[in-house]
Image (tube, rainbow, N blue to C red):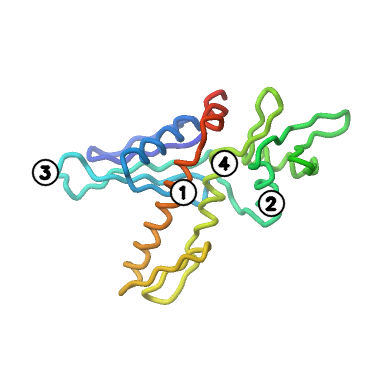
Amino acid sequence: MFHETIVHACGASEGPVSESHALMLLRRALNRRYGFEATLNGGASIRWPPVDLTAQANVLRSITLKPETPVGTLDDATRARLALIGLGDARHVLTADARHIVAGDTQIPMGESARLRARRLVAVDRGGRVRLTLAARLGLLAHDHAQTGGPDGFAMCSCGFTANAPTGEAAETVLRGHRQAVTARFVESIDAAYAAAISSR
């Protein structure tokens, strides 16, 4: 689940939305070529200009998606486990004395499996199949492309991309364009099977 905030010319509205609704919004933003990017909390920010170019010409409209449970810090061990689960074929296994996730040939310890579920980084369907939540995937993407600082006129991304511009603000605009591009590629890469798994919840 996500919390959606919509800002428009007449004010703002907000409320809870499902994973499938959040994915629909991201796909619509991709199709309409809106500016949008993943956020570190596991959500997304979508912005677009108003249709009416009269009195409200300077009002940008936006949708902000925040997961009910923010992704939080993703240390190397957590990222490695999520990467394994993201490869597919991960299962939630129940035995007489344990509940854990098995991803490929790797058994994730019971405590870590429970933490991944409690943080809502993974979801388990009725058949025991495990997938990364949309919030986890957005959070991983945002952490891979977070701004890491730099001198005035430079903006650096954790992926290695560097923006060089006359001012720091201009460099950050270039970096934002980079983040929007990688987020668009991410949304474009979401396959029908993942979308169906989200919709079935």
Answer with mark 1 or mark 3, whichever residue precedes in sequence. Answer: 1
Quarter of the view holding residue 25: top left
Answer with mark 4 or mark 2, whichever residue precedes in sequence. Answer: 4
Answer with mark 2 or mark 3, whichever residue precedes in sequence. Answer: 3
Q: Amino acid at mark 3?
A: Thr
Mark 3 Cα-neighbour bin, 10 Å: few <14, some 14–19, many ≥20? few
Q: CA distance from mark 3 to mark 4?
A: 39 Å
- Which type of secondary structure does the marked residue at label 1 adopt? strand
Mark 4 Cα-neighbour bin, 10 Å: few <14, some 14–19, many ≥20? some
> Residue drawn 19% across and 50% down?
58
94 sits left or right of 50 in the view: right
| Residue 27 pos. (x, y %) | 40, 36
Q: CA distance from mark 1 to mark 2?
A: 20 Å
Pick the quarter of the image with the C terminus. Answer: top right
- Which type of secondary structure does the marked residue at label 3 adopt? loop
Quarter of the view holding residue 109: top right
Q: What residue is pinned by disc 1?
A: 38
Q: Is residue 79 above or below residue 18?
A: below
Q: CA distance from mark 1 to mark 3?
A: 31 Å
| Residue 145 pos. (x, y %) | 50, 58
Q: Is residue 115 above or below residue 147?
A: above
Q: What residue is pinned by disc 4?
A: 69
Q: What residue is pinned by disc 2?
A: 80
Q: What residue is pinned by disc 3?
A: 54
68 sits left or right of 92 in the view: left
